[in-house]
Amino acid sequence: MKTSADEQELERRFQQRIEDEQKIEPKDWMPAAYRKNLIRQISQHAHSEVIGMQPEGNFLTRAPSLRRKAVLLSKIQDEAGHGLYLYSAAETLGTPRSELIAALQAGEAKYASIFNYPTQTWGDVGAIGWLVDGAAIVNQISLQRTSYGPYARGMVRICKEESFHQRQGYEIMIALAHGSAEQREMAQDSLNRFYWPALMMFGPHDRESAHSARSMQWKIKRETNDDLRQKFIDQTVPQIAFLGLEHPDSGIRWNEERQHYDHGEIDWNEFYAVINGNGHCNRQRMEHHIRAHEEGAWVRDAIAAHREKRGGRKQQVA
Amino acid sequence: MNDDDSKQATLAYALRLGDDSLVLGQRISEWVSNAPFLEEDIACGNVALDYIGRARLYYGYAAELAADGRDEDDFAYLRSAREFRNYLIYELPRGDFAFTQVRQLLVDLFNTGYLAALAGSRDATLAAIAAKAIKETRYHLRRSREWVLRLGDGTGESHRRTQKALDDLWGYTHELFEPDALELRLAAAGTGVDTAALKPEWKRALAAVLNEATLSLPADDWAVRGGRTGYHTENLGHLLTQLQSIHRAYPGCRW
Protein backbone atom coordinates (compact mmCIF):
# COMPACT_ATOMS: atom_id res chain seq x y z
CA MET A 1 0.00 0.00 0.00
CA LYS A 2 1.31 3.42 -0.93
CA THR A 3 1.78 6.00 1.78
CA SER A 4 0.96 9.62 1.17
CA ALA A 5 4.72 10.28 1.18
CA ASP A 6 5.03 7.88 -1.77
CA GLU A 7 2.19 9.68 -3.51
CA GLN A 8 3.84 13.02 -3.01
CA GLU A 9 7.07 11.69 -4.45
CA LEU A 10 5.24 10.28 -7.48
CA GLU A 11 3.49 13.59 -7.99
CA ARG A 12 6.77 15.48 -7.67
CA ARG A 13 8.39 13.27 -10.31
CA PHE A 14 5.34 13.57 -12.53
CA GLN A 15 5.46 17.37 -12.39
CA GLN A 16 9.20 17.24 -13.10
CA ARG A 17 8.57 15.21 -16.25
CA ILE A 18 6.00 17.79 -17.33
CA GLU A 19 8.54 20.57 -16.70
CA ASP A 20 11.08 18.63 -18.77
CA GLU A 21 8.59 18.48 -21.66
CA GLN A 22 8.40 14.71 -21.55
CA LYS A 23 5.13 13.22 -22.83
CA ILE A 24 2.97 11.31 -20.38
CA GLU A 25 1.93 7.95 -21.82
CA PRO A 26 -1.13 5.79 -20.96
CA LYS A 27 0.69 3.37 -18.65
CA ASP A 28 2.63 6.05 -16.78
CA TRP A 29 1.63 7.06 -13.28
CA MET A 30 -0.47 10.24 -13.27
CA PRO A 31 -2.45 12.11 -10.62
CA ALA A 32 -6.12 11.13 -10.56
CA ALA A 33 -7.11 14.74 -11.17
CA TYR A 34 -4.84 14.94 -14.26
CA ARG A 35 -6.54 11.84 -15.66
CA LYS A 36 -9.99 13.20 -14.90
CA ASN A 37 -9.20 16.58 -16.40
CA LEU A 38 -7.89 14.96 -19.58
CA ILE A 39 -10.88 12.65 -19.98
CA ARG A 40 -13.13 15.68 -19.62
CA GLN A 41 -11.23 17.72 -22.19
CA ILE A 42 -10.58 14.97 -24.76
CA SER A 43 -14.11 13.60 -24.62
CA GLN A 44 -15.54 17.09 -24.90
CA HIS A 45 -13.38 17.56 -27.96
CA ALA A 46 -14.54 14.20 -29.40
CA HIS A 47 -18.20 15.04 -28.76
CA SER A 48 -17.70 18.38 -30.50
CA GLU A 49 -16.44 16.66 -33.64
CA VAL A 50 -19.43 14.32 -33.61
CA ILE A 51 -22.12 16.89 -32.87
CA GLY A 52 -20.41 19.19 -35.37
CA MET A 53 -21.47 16.79 -38.13
CA GLN A 54 -25.06 17.96 -37.69
CA PRO A 55 -24.96 21.65 -38.63
CA GLU A 56 -22.88 20.98 -41.74
CA GLY A 57 -24.75 17.78 -42.49
CA ASN A 58 -27.82 20.00 -42.66
CA PHE A 59 -26.57 21.13 -46.10
CA LEU A 60 -25.21 17.82 -47.38
CA THR A 61 -28.31 17.01 -49.39
CA ARG A 62 -28.61 20.61 -50.66
CA ALA A 63 -25.03 21.58 -51.55
CA PRO A 64 -25.37 23.87 -54.58
CA SER A 65 -22.92 22.05 -56.86
CA LEU A 66 -21.70 18.48 -57.18
CA ARG A 67 -18.14 19.56 -56.41
CA ARG A 68 -19.28 21.26 -53.20
CA LYS A 69 -21.32 18.21 -52.26
CA ALA A 70 -18.31 15.93 -52.69
CA VAL A 71 -16.04 18.25 -50.72
CA LEU A 72 -18.54 18.64 -47.90
CA LEU A 73 -19.00 14.87 -47.68
CA SER A 74 -15.24 14.43 -47.35
CA LYS A 75 -15.02 17.15 -44.79
CA ILE A 76 -17.74 15.76 -42.57
CA GLN A 77 -16.20 12.32 -42.89
CA ASP A 78 -12.92 13.77 -41.62
CA GLU A 79 -14.69 15.28 -38.63
CA ALA A 80 -16.21 11.92 -37.75
CA GLY A 81 -12.73 10.44 -38.08
CA HIS A 82 -11.40 13.04 -35.64
CA GLY A 83 -14.13 11.98 -33.26
CA LEU A 84 -12.85 8.42 -33.53
CA TYR A 85 -9.19 9.31 -32.83
CA LEU A 86 -10.24 11.39 -29.88
CA TYR A 87 -12.51 8.74 -28.39
CA SER A 88 -9.60 6.33 -28.77
CA ALA A 89 -7.26 8.79 -27.05
CA ALA A 90 -9.76 9.12 -24.20
CA GLU A 91 -10.07 5.34 -23.99
CA THR A 92 -6.32 5.08 -23.30
CA LEU A 93 -7.18 6.74 -20.00
CA GLY A 94 -9.48 3.89 -19.07
CA THR A 95 -12.95 5.11 -20.02
CA PRO A 96 -14.74 3.22 -22.83
CA ARG A 97 -16.46 5.10 -25.62
CA SER A 98 -19.89 3.82 -24.57
CA GLU A 99 -19.48 5.54 -21.19
CA LEU A 100 -18.33 8.77 -22.81
CA ILE A 101 -21.36 8.75 -25.12
CA ALA A 102 -23.69 7.97 -22.23
CA ALA A 103 -22.27 10.98 -20.37
CA LEU A 104 -22.89 13.18 -23.42
CA GLN A 105 -26.46 11.99 -23.77
CA ALA A 106 -27.10 12.43 -20.05
CA GLY A 107 -25.95 16.05 -20.35
CA GLU A 108 -22.96 15.47 -18.06
CA ALA A 109 -20.36 15.99 -20.78
CA LYS A 110 -20.23 19.08 -22.95
CA TYR A 111 -19.49 19.75 -26.60
CA ALA A 112 -18.48 23.00 -28.27
CA SER A 113 -21.29 25.47 -27.86
CA ILE A 114 -20.79 26.81 -31.38
CA PHE A 115 -22.69 23.81 -32.75
CA ASN A 116 -25.82 25.00 -31.02
CA TYR A 117 -26.06 27.76 -33.61
CA PRO A 118 -28.25 26.90 -36.61
CA THR A 119 -26.96 26.70 -40.18
CA GLN A 120 -29.50 28.72 -42.11
CA THR A 121 -27.85 29.34 -45.49
CA TRP A 122 -25.15 27.84 -47.67
CA GLY A 123 -22.96 30.75 -46.56
CA ASP A 124 -23.00 29.27 -43.08
CA VAL A 125 -21.23 26.17 -44.37
CA GLY A 126 -18.49 28.46 -45.64
CA ALA A 127 -18.39 30.47 -42.42
CA ILE A 128 -18.14 27.34 -40.30
CA GLY A 129 -15.23 25.95 -42.30
CA TRP A 130 -13.45 29.27 -42.31
CA LEU A 131 -14.15 30.66 -38.84
CA VAL A 132 -15.13 27.69 -36.68
CA ASP A 133 -12.51 25.33 -38.03
CA GLY A 134 -10.12 28.28 -38.16
CA ALA A 135 -10.63 28.95 -34.46
CA ALA A 136 -10.33 25.25 -33.71
CA ILE A 137 -6.98 25.09 -35.51
CA VAL A 138 -5.53 27.95 -33.48
CA ASN A 139 -6.42 26.02 -30.35
CA GLN A 140 -5.33 22.65 -31.73
CA ILE A 141 -1.94 23.82 -32.98
CA SER A 142 -1.12 24.69 -29.42
CA LEU A 143 -2.47 21.30 -28.29
CA GLN A 144 0.06 19.49 -30.48
CA ARG A 145 2.40 20.22 -27.57
CA THR A 146 0.01 19.07 -24.87
CA SER A 147 1.60 16.88 -22.20
CA TYR A 148 -0.45 13.72 -22.82
CA GLY A 149 1.17 11.72 -25.65
CA PRO A 150 -1.86 10.14 -27.39
CA TYR A 151 -3.71 13.47 -27.37
CA ALA A 152 -0.71 15.39 -28.73
CA ARG A 153 -0.15 12.87 -31.53
CA GLY A 154 -3.85 12.84 -32.44
CA MET A 155 -3.70 16.62 -32.72
CA VAL A 156 -0.85 16.53 -35.24
CA ARG A 157 -2.98 14.58 -37.69
CA ILE A 158 -6.16 16.47 -36.91
CA CYS A 159 -4.45 19.81 -37.53
CA LYS A 160 -3.38 18.77 -41.02
CA GLU A 161 -6.95 17.94 -41.98
CA GLU A 162 -8.42 20.98 -40.25
CA SER A 163 -6.26 23.30 -42.30
CA PHE A 164 -7.83 21.79 -45.44
CA HIS A 165 -11.23 22.36 -43.90
CA GLN A 166 -10.50 25.96 -43.22
CA ARG A 167 -9.39 26.50 -46.81
CA GLN A 168 -12.51 24.69 -47.97
CA GLY A 169 -14.68 27.10 -45.99
CA TYR A 170 -12.74 30.15 -47.11
CA GLU A 171 -13.01 29.01 -50.73
CA ILE A 172 -16.80 28.89 -50.36
CA MET A 173 -16.67 32.44 -48.99
CA ILE A 174 -14.48 33.62 -51.89
CA ALA A 175 -16.97 32.21 -54.40
CA LEU A 176 -19.84 33.96 -52.60
CA ALA A 177 -17.97 37.23 -52.12
CA HIS A 178 -17.12 37.31 -55.83
CA GLY A 179 -20.56 36.15 -56.90
CA SER A 180 -23.90 37.88 -57.37
CA ALA A 181 -25.21 40.61 -55.07
CA GLU A 182 -27.35 38.02 -53.29
CA GLN A 183 -24.35 35.77 -52.78
CA ARG A 184 -22.27 38.62 -51.35
CA GLU A 185 -25.11 39.42 -49.00
CA MET A 186 -25.23 35.77 -47.98
CA ALA A 187 -21.50 35.83 -47.23
CA GLN A 188 -21.75 38.98 -45.14
CA ASP A 189 -24.73 37.66 -43.22
CA SER A 190 -22.95 34.38 -42.40
CA LEU A 191 -19.83 36.25 -41.32
CA ASN A 192 -21.92 38.50 -39.08
CA ARG A 193 -23.65 35.58 -37.42
CA PHE A 194 -20.63 33.31 -36.94
CA TYR A 195 -17.84 35.77 -36.12
CA TRP A 196 -18.74 36.39 -32.48
CA PRO A 197 -19.65 32.80 -31.64
CA ALA A 198 -16.28 31.77 -33.16
CA LEU A 199 -14.51 34.14 -30.73
CA MET A 200 -16.45 32.55 -27.89
CA MET A 201 -15.03 29.15 -28.83
CA PHE A 202 -11.84 30.06 -26.98
CA GLY A 203 -13.78 30.09 -23.76
CA PRO A 204 -14.20 32.75 -21.10
CA HIS A 205 -11.47 35.20 -20.12
CA ASP A 206 -8.63 33.41 -18.34
CA ARG A 207 -9.53 34.92 -15.00
CA GLU A 208 -12.99 33.35 -15.26
CA SER A 209 -12.03 30.00 -16.72
CA ALA A 210 -12.77 27.09 -14.38
CA HIS A 211 -10.06 24.71 -15.53
CA SER A 212 -7.39 27.00 -16.95
CA ALA A 213 -4.83 27.37 -14.17
CA ARG A 214 -4.52 23.69 -13.38
CA SER A 215 -4.46 22.73 -17.05
CA MET A 216 -1.67 25.22 -17.70
CA GLN A 217 0.37 23.86 -14.80
CA TRP A 218 0.02 20.34 -16.18
CA LYS A 219 0.67 21.60 -19.69
CA ILE A 220 -2.57 20.06 -20.91
CA LYS A 221 -3.24 23.60 -22.10
CA ARG A 222 -0.23 25.42 -23.49
CA GLU A 223 -1.60 28.89 -24.09
CA THR A 224 -4.33 30.88 -22.41
CA ASN A 225 -7.83 31.41 -23.82
CA ASP A 226 -7.23 35.12 -24.31
CA ASP A 227 -3.87 34.67 -26.06
CA LEU A 228 -5.33 32.12 -28.46
CA ARG A 229 -8.35 34.32 -29.12
CA GLN A 230 -6.08 37.26 -29.91
CA LYS A 231 -4.18 35.16 -32.46
CA PHE A 232 -7.43 34.28 -34.16
CA ILE A 233 -8.67 37.88 -34.18
CA ASP A 234 -5.39 39.03 -35.70
CA GLN A 235 -5.34 36.43 -38.45
CA THR A 236 -8.98 36.99 -39.39
CA VAL A 237 -8.79 40.75 -40.06
CA PRO A 238 -6.88 40.46 -43.38
CA GLN A 239 -9.01 37.48 -44.41
CA ILE A 240 -12.17 39.55 -44.05
CA ALA A 241 -10.52 42.41 -45.94
CA PHE A 242 -9.50 40.09 -48.79
CA LEU A 243 -13.11 39.01 -49.19
CA GLY A 244 -14.14 42.65 -49.36
CA LEU A 245 -16.62 42.14 -46.54
CA GLU A 246 -17.31 44.44 -43.65
CA HIS A 247 -15.74 43.49 -40.31
CA PRO A 248 -18.52 42.59 -37.84
CA ASP A 249 -16.64 44.25 -34.96
CA SER A 250 -16.81 48.03 -35.30
CA GLY A 251 -14.27 48.26 -32.48
CA ILE A 252 -11.49 46.54 -34.40
CA ARG A 253 -8.31 48.73 -34.43
CA TRP A 254 -4.63 47.97 -34.93
CA ASN A 255 -2.68 48.71 -31.75
CA GLU A 256 0.88 49.61 -32.71
CA GLU A 257 2.15 49.28 -29.17
CA ARG A 258 0.72 45.81 -28.53
CA GLN A 259 1.26 44.71 -32.14
CA HIS A 260 -2.22 43.25 -32.00
CA TYR A 261 -5.74 44.28 -32.92
CA ASP A 262 -7.85 45.81 -30.17
CA HIS A 263 -11.41 44.61 -30.36
CA GLY A 264 -14.90 45.07 -29.00
CA GLU A 265 -16.19 43.09 -26.04
CA ILE A 266 -17.81 39.73 -26.51
CA ASP A 267 -21.41 39.34 -25.38
CA TRP A 268 -20.74 36.96 -22.51
CA ASN A 269 -24.42 36.82 -21.63
CA GLU A 270 -25.01 35.15 -24.97
CA PHE A 271 -22.09 32.80 -24.35
CA TYR A 272 -23.47 31.61 -21.01
CA ALA A 273 -27.04 31.50 -22.30
CA VAL A 274 -26.07 29.12 -25.11
CA ILE A 275 -23.89 27.00 -22.83
CA ASN A 276 -26.78 26.74 -20.41
CA GLY A 277 -29.14 25.32 -22.99
CA ASN A 278 -30.67 28.42 -24.54
CA GLY A 279 -29.09 28.19 -27.98
CA HIS A 280 -31.32 27.63 -31.00
CA CYS A 281 -30.25 24.02 -31.40
CA ASN A 282 -29.16 22.61 -28.01
CA ARG A 283 -32.16 20.35 -27.67
CA GLN A 284 -32.28 19.48 -31.36
CA ARG A 285 -28.62 18.40 -31.44
CA MET A 286 -28.98 16.14 -28.45
CA GLU A 287 -32.28 14.66 -29.61
CA HIS A 288 -30.76 13.93 -33.00
CA HIS A 289 -27.78 12.18 -31.41
CA ILE A 290 -29.94 10.14 -29.06
CA ARG A 291 -32.43 9.22 -31.79
CA ALA A 292 -29.69 7.93 -34.13
CA HIS A 293 -28.12 6.04 -31.24
CA GLU A 294 -31.42 4.45 -30.21
CA GLU A 295 -32.43 3.63 -33.78
CA GLY A 296 -29.09 1.89 -34.16
CA ALA A 297 -29.49 -0.25 -31.03
CA TRP A 298 -30.93 -3.26 -32.90
CA VAL A 299 -28.03 -3.09 -35.37
CA ARG A 300 -25.45 -3.15 -32.60
CA ASP A 301 -27.33 -6.02 -30.95
CA ALA A 302 -27.32 -7.90 -34.23
CA ILE A 303 -23.55 -7.56 -34.55
CA ALA A 304 -23.05 -8.94 -31.06
CA ALA A 305 -25.47 -11.83 -31.65
CA HIS A 306 -23.88 -12.67 -34.99
CA ARG A 307 -20.40 -12.63 -33.51
CA GLU A 308 -21.51 -14.98 -30.78
CA LYS A 309 -23.18 -17.34 -33.25
CA ARG A 310 -20.17 -17.38 -35.52
CA GLY A 311 -17.82 -17.98 -32.59
CA GLY A 312 -20.11 -20.82 -31.48
CA ARG A 313 -20.14 -22.35 -34.95
CA LYS A 314 -16.37 -22.16 -35.28
CA GLN A 315 -16.05 -23.99 -31.98
CA GLN A 316 -18.38 -26.71 -33.22
CA VAL A 317 -16.26 -27.13 -36.34
CA ALA A 318 -13.14 -27.32 -34.22
CA MET B 1 -26.10 4.19 -86.58
CA ASN B 2 -24.25 7.24 -87.92
CA ASP B 3 -21.76 9.18 -85.80
CA ASP B 4 -24.26 11.74 -84.62
CA ASP B 5 -26.83 9.10 -83.65
CA SER B 6 -24.17 7.20 -81.85
CA LYS B 7 -23.06 10.29 -79.97
CA GLN B 8 -26.64 11.08 -78.92
CA ALA B 9 -27.15 7.50 -77.81
CA THR B 10 -23.95 7.53 -75.75
CA LEU B 11 -24.93 10.86 -74.23
CA ALA B 12 -28.31 9.47 -73.14
CA TYR B 13 -26.57 6.38 -71.80
CA ALA B 14 -24.02 8.38 -69.80
CA LEU B 15 -26.84 10.46 -68.33
CA ARG B 16 -28.65 7.34 -67.16
CA LEU B 17 -25.55 6.13 -65.39
CA GLY B 18 -24.97 9.57 -63.92
CA ASP B 19 -28.56 9.66 -62.65
CA ASP B 20 -28.19 6.22 -61.03
CA SER B 21 -25.04 7.37 -59.25
CA LEU B 22 -26.30 10.74 -58.13
CA VAL B 23 -29.63 9.51 -56.79
CA LEU B 24 -28.14 6.64 -54.81
CA GLY B 25 -25.25 8.81 -53.56
CA GLN B 26 -27.78 11.37 -52.34
CA ARG B 27 -29.76 8.68 -50.52
CA ILE B 28 -26.73 7.16 -48.81
CA SER B 29 -25.46 10.59 -47.75
CA GLU B 30 -28.61 10.91 -45.62
CA TRP B 31 -27.02 8.42 -43.20
CA VAL B 32 -24.23 10.80 -42.23
CA SER B 33 -24.80 11.61 -38.51
CA ASN B 34 -27.72 9.15 -38.48
CA ALA B 35 -25.85 5.84 -38.61
CA PRO B 36 -25.93 3.19 -35.83
CA PHE B 37 -22.39 4.13 -34.72
CA LEU B 38 -19.62 6.51 -35.66
CA GLU B 39 -17.67 4.11 -37.91
CA GLU B 40 -20.80 3.74 -40.04
CA ASP B 41 -21.26 7.51 -40.34
CA ILE B 42 -17.82 7.50 -41.91
CA ALA B 43 -18.38 4.42 -44.06
CA CYS B 44 -21.74 5.63 -45.41
CA GLY B 45 -20.17 9.00 -46.18
CA ASN B 46 -17.43 7.22 -48.05
CA VAL B 47 -19.78 5.14 -50.18
CA ALA B 48 -21.91 8.21 -50.89
CA LEU B 49 -18.79 10.04 -51.95
CA ASP B 50 -17.86 7.27 -54.39
CA TYR B 51 -21.28 7.58 -56.02
CA ILE B 52 -21.19 11.36 -56.20
CA GLY B 53 -17.73 11.07 -57.75
CA ARG B 54 -19.10 8.62 -60.30
CA ALA B 55 -22.02 10.93 -61.11
CA ARG B 56 -19.55 13.72 -61.82
CA LEU B 57 -17.57 11.52 -64.21
CA TYR B 58 -20.63 10.35 -66.14
CA TYR B 59 -22.18 13.83 -66.29
CA GLY B 60 -18.84 15.31 -67.22
CA TYR B 61 -18.67 12.92 -70.16
CA ALA B 62 -22.28 13.72 -71.08
CA ALA B 63 -21.37 17.41 -71.08
CA GLU B 64 -18.43 16.70 -73.35
CA LEU B 65 -20.67 14.80 -75.77
CA ALA B 66 -23.41 17.44 -75.65
CA ALA B 67 -20.86 20.19 -76.36
CA ASP B 68 -23.53 22.83 -75.92
CA GLY B 69 -22.17 24.66 -72.89
CA ARG B 70 -23.95 22.52 -70.29
CA ASP B 71 -21.83 21.15 -67.45
CA GLU B 72 -22.21 18.45 -64.80
CA ASP B 73 -24.27 20.71 -62.55
CA ASP B 74 -26.75 21.53 -65.31
CA PHE B 75 -27.52 17.82 -65.63
CA ALA B 76 -27.76 17.29 -61.87
CA TYR B 77 -29.58 20.43 -60.83
CA LEU B 78 -31.65 21.65 -63.74
CA ARG B 79 -33.53 18.58 -64.93
CA SER B 80 -36.95 17.57 -63.64
CA ALA B 81 -37.91 14.23 -62.13
CA ARG B 82 -39.48 13.19 -65.46
CA GLU B 83 -36.15 13.76 -67.18
CA PHE B 84 -34.20 11.62 -64.73
CA ARG B 85 -33.58 8.08 -65.95
CA ASN B 86 -32.29 6.30 -62.84
CA TYR B 87 -33.55 2.86 -61.91
CA LEU B 88 -36.35 3.11 -59.34
CA ILE B 89 -34.50 1.06 -56.73
CA TYR B 90 -32.04 3.92 -56.25
CA GLU B 91 -34.64 6.55 -55.39
CA LEU B 92 -36.48 4.61 -52.67
CA PRO B 93 -36.10 6.28 -49.25
CA ARG B 94 -33.20 5.11 -47.14
CA GLY B 95 -35.48 3.14 -44.81
CA ASP B 96 -33.88 1.47 -41.83
CA PHE B 97 -30.30 0.23 -41.81
CA ALA B 98 -31.38 -3.20 -43.06
CA PHE B 99 -33.17 -1.66 -46.04
CA THR B 100 -30.10 0.38 -46.92
CA GLN B 101 -27.74 -2.57 -46.70
CA VAL B 102 -30.00 -4.99 -48.57
CA ARG B 103 -30.46 -2.46 -51.38
CA GLN B 104 -26.72 -2.03 -51.40
CA LEU B 105 -26.11 -5.76 -51.69
CA LEU B 106 -28.58 -6.03 -54.59
CA VAL B 107 -27.02 -3.16 -56.51
CA ASP B 108 -23.42 -3.98 -55.59
CA LEU B 109 -23.86 -7.45 -57.03
CA PHE B 110 -25.51 -5.93 -60.09
CA ASN B 111 -22.79 -3.33 -60.53
CA THR B 112 -20.03 -5.88 -60.08
CA GLY B 113 -21.19 -7.60 -63.26
CA TYR B 114 -22.19 -4.40 -64.99
CA LEU B 115 -18.99 -2.45 -64.46
CA ALA B 116 -16.80 -5.44 -65.33
CA ALA B 117 -18.61 -5.58 -68.68
CA LEU B 118 -18.54 -1.80 -69.17
CA ALA B 119 -14.80 -1.74 -68.45
CA GLY B 120 -14.46 -3.62 -71.76
CA SER B 121 -16.51 -1.01 -73.64
CA ARG B 122 -15.28 0.25 -77.01
CA ASP B 123 -15.97 3.72 -75.68
CA ALA B 124 -12.68 4.60 -73.98
CA THR B 125 -14.21 7.08 -71.54
CA LEU B 126 -16.97 4.77 -70.33
CA ALA B 127 -14.41 1.97 -70.04
CA ALA B 128 -12.11 4.16 -67.94
CA ILE B 129 -14.93 5.29 -65.63
CA ALA B 130 -16.02 1.66 -65.17
CA ALA B 131 -12.46 0.53 -64.47
CA LYS B 132 -12.25 3.06 -61.66
CA ALA B 133 -15.76 2.43 -60.34
CA ILE B 134 -15.48 -1.33 -60.18
CA LYS B 135 -12.70 -1.10 -57.61
CA GLU B 136 -15.03 0.91 -55.40
CA THR B 137 -17.95 -1.43 -56.03
CA ARG B 138 -15.94 -4.51 -55.07
CA TYR B 139 -15.21 -2.83 -51.78
CA HIS B 140 -18.84 -1.77 -51.34
CA LEU B 141 -19.86 -5.37 -51.96
CA ARG B 142 -17.56 -6.67 -49.25
CA ARG B 143 -19.28 -4.29 -46.88
CA SER B 144 -22.91 -4.89 -47.92
CA ARG B 145 -22.36 -8.67 -47.99
CA GLU B 146 -20.92 -8.62 -44.47
CA TRP B 147 -23.78 -6.46 -43.27
CA VAL B 148 -26.47 -8.69 -44.74
CA LEU B 149 -24.80 -11.72 -43.16
CA ARG B 150 -24.67 -10.06 -39.75
CA LEU B 151 -28.18 -8.65 -39.90
CA GLY B 152 -29.77 -11.72 -41.48
CA ASP B 153 -28.14 -14.07 -39.03
CA GLY B 154 -28.09 -11.77 -36.00
CA THR B 155 -31.08 -11.35 -33.69
CA GLY B 156 -34.72 -12.21 -34.36
CA GLU B 157 -35.45 -8.53 -34.93
CA SER B 158 -32.56 -7.99 -37.32
CA HIS B 159 -33.53 -11.11 -39.28
CA ARG B 160 -37.14 -9.93 -39.56
CA ARG B 161 -36.12 -6.43 -40.68
CA THR B 162 -33.66 -7.78 -43.23
CA GLN B 163 -36.09 -10.26 -44.76
CA LYS B 164 -38.73 -7.53 -44.93
CA ALA B 165 -36.29 -5.19 -46.67
CA LEU B 166 -35.51 -7.89 -49.21
CA ASP B 167 -39.20 -8.58 -49.81
CA ASP B 168 -39.96 -4.86 -50.18
CA LEU B 169 -37.09 -4.30 -52.60
CA TRP B 170 -37.49 -7.40 -54.71
CA GLY B 171 -40.04 -6.01 -57.14
CA TYR B 172 -37.65 -3.20 -58.06
CA THR B 173 -34.83 -5.52 -59.11
CA HIS B 174 -36.47 -6.84 -62.29
CA GLU B 175 -36.02 -3.72 -64.38
CA LEU B 176 -32.28 -3.84 -63.78
CA PHE B 177 -32.16 -6.79 -66.19
CA GLU B 178 -34.53 -5.48 -68.85
CA PRO B 179 -32.46 -3.44 -71.30
CA ASP B 180 -34.42 -1.16 -73.61
CA ALA B 181 -33.79 -0.54 -77.30
CA LEU B 182 -31.10 2.08 -76.66
CA GLU B 183 -29.17 -0.16 -74.31
CA LEU B 184 -29.43 -3.13 -76.64
CA ARG B 185 -28.22 -1.01 -79.55
CA LEU B 186 -25.20 0.19 -77.59
CA ALA B 187 -24.54 -3.32 -76.32
CA ALA B 188 -24.59 -4.60 -79.89
CA ALA B 189 -22.14 -1.85 -80.84
CA GLY B 190 -19.80 -2.94 -78.07
CA THR B 191 -20.27 0.31 -76.14
CA GLY B 192 -22.94 -0.59 -73.59
CA VAL B 193 -23.93 -3.55 -71.46
CA ASP B 194 -26.71 -6.07 -72.09
CA THR B 195 -27.93 -6.40 -68.54
CA ALA B 196 -30.19 -9.39 -69.30
CA ALA B 197 -27.01 -11.43 -69.63
CA LEU B 198 -25.98 -10.49 -66.09
CA LYS B 199 -29.02 -11.95 -64.36
CA PRO B 200 -28.05 -15.63 -63.92
CA GLU B 201 -24.76 -14.81 -62.20
CA TRP B 202 -26.38 -12.06 -60.13
CA LYS B 203 -29.05 -14.43 -58.89
CA ARG B 204 -26.56 -17.20 -58.17
CA ALA B 205 -24.27 -14.91 -56.15
CA LEU B 206 -27.21 -13.37 -54.33
CA ALA B 207 -28.69 -16.76 -53.43
CA ALA B 208 -25.35 -17.79 -51.93
CA VAL B 209 -25.24 -14.75 -49.65
CA LEU B 210 -28.89 -15.09 -48.66
CA ASN B 211 -28.42 -18.73 -47.86
CA GLU B 212 -25.52 -17.96 -45.55
CA ALA B 213 -27.54 -15.12 -44.01
CA THR B 214 -30.48 -17.48 -43.35
CA LEU B 215 -32.70 -15.33 -45.60
CA SER B 216 -35.07 -16.51 -48.33
CA LEU B 217 -35.11 -15.43 -51.92
CA PRO B 218 -38.52 -13.78 -52.49
CA ALA B 219 -40.94 -15.07 -55.11
CA ASP B 220 -41.08 -13.22 -58.43
CA ASP B 221 -44.72 -12.28 -57.95
CA TRP B 222 -44.55 -8.51 -58.39
CA ALA B 223 -42.46 -6.04 -60.36
CA VAL B 224 -42.43 -2.25 -60.70
CA ARG B 225 -40.72 -0.69 -63.72
CA GLY B 226 -40.17 2.72 -65.25
CA GLY B 227 -36.85 4.26 -64.19
CA ARG B 228 -35.32 4.22 -67.67
CA THR B 229 -38.41 5.87 -69.18
CA GLY B 230 -38.70 8.54 -66.50
CA TYR B 231 -41.81 7.02 -64.90
CA HIS B 232 -40.78 7.37 -61.28
CA THR B 233 -42.07 6.69 -57.78
CA GLU B 234 -43.24 9.68 -55.74
CA ASN B 235 -39.92 9.70 -53.91
CA LEU B 236 -37.76 11.11 -56.67
CA GLY B 237 -39.52 14.47 -56.81
CA HIS B 238 -38.84 15.06 -53.13
CA LEU B 239 -35.25 13.92 -53.42
CA LEU B 240 -34.65 16.33 -56.30
CA THR B 241 -36.53 19.17 -54.61
CA GLN B 242 -34.06 19.00 -51.77
CA LEU B 243 -31.00 18.36 -53.92
CA GLN B 244 -31.74 21.19 -56.34
CA SER B 245 -33.27 23.79 -54.01
CA ILE B 246 -30.32 26.14 -53.45
CA HIS B 247 -28.95 25.81 -56.94
CA ARG B 248 -32.33 26.68 -58.42
CA ALA B 249 -33.01 29.49 -55.95
CA TYR B 250 -30.03 31.45 -57.32
CA PRO B 251 -30.15 30.97 -61.09
CA GLY B 252 -26.88 31.31 -62.96
CA CYS B 253 -24.66 31.61 -59.89
CA ARG B 254 -21.25 29.98 -59.48
CA TRP B 255 -20.52 28.24 -56.20
Image (cartoon, coloured by chain):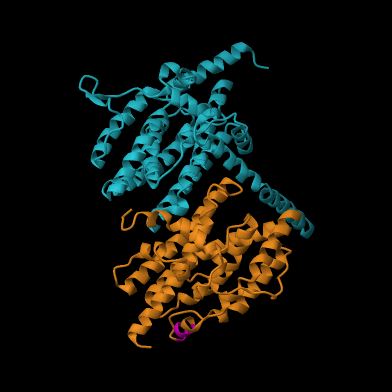
Q: Which chain is cyan?
A: A
User: Could you tell whether A295 is left or right of B187 in the image?
Assistant: right
Q: Which chain is orange?
A: B
User: Does residue A23 lie above or below A55 as drawn?
Assistant: above
In percent of the image, x 31 and y 29: which residue is there?
A233
Q: Can you see residue A297?
A: yes
Q: Main secondary structure of the magenta part?
A: helix
> Which segment did they paint magenta?
B184-188
Residues B39 and B41: in front is: B41
Farthest residue in the bottom direction? B1
* Displayed quadrant of residue A232: top left
Residues B212 and A262: in front is: A262
User: Could you tell whether A252 is left or right of B30 in the image?
Assistant: left
**Residue B214: x, y in percent?**
74, 64
**Residue A105: x, y in percent?**
61, 35
Farthest residue in the top direction? A5
